[in-house]
Amino acid sequence: MTKVDYYEVLSVSRDANDQEIKTAYRKLAMQYHPDRNPNNPAAEEKFKECGEAYSVLSDPDKRAAYDRYGHAAFQGGAGAGNPFTGGFGGAQDLGDIFGDLFGEMFNMGGAGGRKASRVQRGRDLRYDLMLEFEEAVFGIEREIKIRRMEMCDDCKGSGAAKGKKAVTCTQCGGRGQQRFQQGFFSVARTCSVCGGTGTLIVDPCATCRGETRVQAEHTILVKVPAGVEQDTRIRYQGEGEAGKFGGPAGDLYVVLTVKAHKFFERDGDDLHCVMPISFPQAALGTELEIETLEGSATIKVPEGTQSGREFKLKGKGVPHLNSHGKGDLIVEIRVQTPSKLNKAQKELLRQLSETMVVENTPTSRGLFEKVKEMFS
Ligand code: ZN
Ligand code: ZN
């Protein structure tokens, strides 16, 4: 059998460093891991090949020998004096590599194997709740109905008929996994008989058919605090789906969507709006009545107010979500240039214009902004 070059197997260059080799191996091993490629002999073969390449290239001595002698360095019976004859130093260190790389990912529990737990945590659930703008600002309580898996009452989550119990799976001895020796390491697969639960229900509960849970509708009172924003998530621990076999329930996440307001826009806890006024109002000054989220307020616009000037109404914004106090309401004045004037109005404006001297000479934007500030 011709062996593929170890560097080619891992798709690394011959001068790749340890980290590059490790990264390359990790990526490939994940891709071809039998747990992810059930009943795929080609992937299994690839997986073995990668493991072998890694076990050599990750060890400085073996790598040096490989670089010098190629595969011959490791061929059994290659002759006396070959220090590498007889495999790759045992499965032990590979187990370490393996545990290190896959321990968390595949929940393999290291070399010792584990007793399968039938108990599984239930899924988390998401519920999208649409709020009016004001509801987000002031908070609200709302009952929602969710459909979820709940523990079957008739079997109390055991899945077995009354008076019956689940028995230990004879195929895997309750481990939930079957181990296969593949070359120099072993691979665990979910037990095909019990589906990984480690137990068999011979006489299933009639209500849940052995699933241990049933679909149910549940009402939850969602308490939305004042000051929430778009996409705020409220977590209700244990209100997700029940776990199988009496396992802990998942969580429920209520995700908030906030409708737009007809004129207020939020910037954190501040509210912004634009207030149009006429040129005479801006020139002569005026009082404006403005609708806030909590009743009306008055803004005193002084004479000579420039377009773009902002007025701040302190504490008329959104309550801070996690502390006391509120944001502000900021009202931006926009002076409207009249566009539909009748004859009489035009005549008045002409008379006004004759009394005013404006120097129509260009200025820089910066200077103009300064002048505007001076006026505001
Ligand atoms: Zn049941
Ligand atoms: Zn089993």
Image: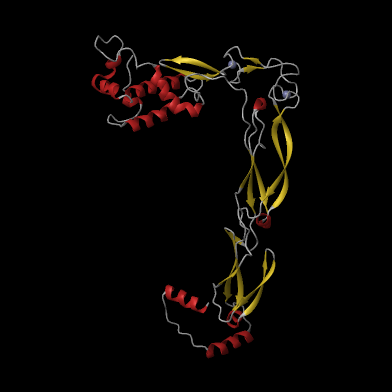
Tally of numbered discs: 0
Residue at 43 percent across and 27 percent down: it is: 100
Front residue (pair 100, 66): 100
Q: Residue furthest front?
A: 324
| Residue toward you, 39 or 291 | 291
Q: Quadrant of the N terminus?
A: top left
The relative height of residue 100 versus residue 83 in the rendered view (above or below) is: below
Answer above or below: position of 289 versus 14: below
Comparing 290 with 242, the one in front is 242
169 on left or right of 218: left
Q: Position of residue 252 (x, y in %)?
A: 65, 39
Q: Toward which corner of the image does residue 123 lie, by quadrant?
A: top right
Percent across and percent down for residue 260 are 63, 57
Q: Is residue 192 left or right of residue 16?
A: right
Coordinates of residue 40 in the picture (x, y in percent): 48, 20
Ligand 1 shows up in the quarter that is top right
- Residue that appears at 48% across and 85% down: 358
Query: Image quadrant of residue 155?
Result: top right
Q: Kindly identify the residue that appears in the image at 44 percent across and 22 percent down.
A: 43
At 49% from the left edge and 78% from the top edge, which residue is drawn?
374
Q: Quadrant of residue 310?
A: bottom right
Colour scheme in use: secondary structure
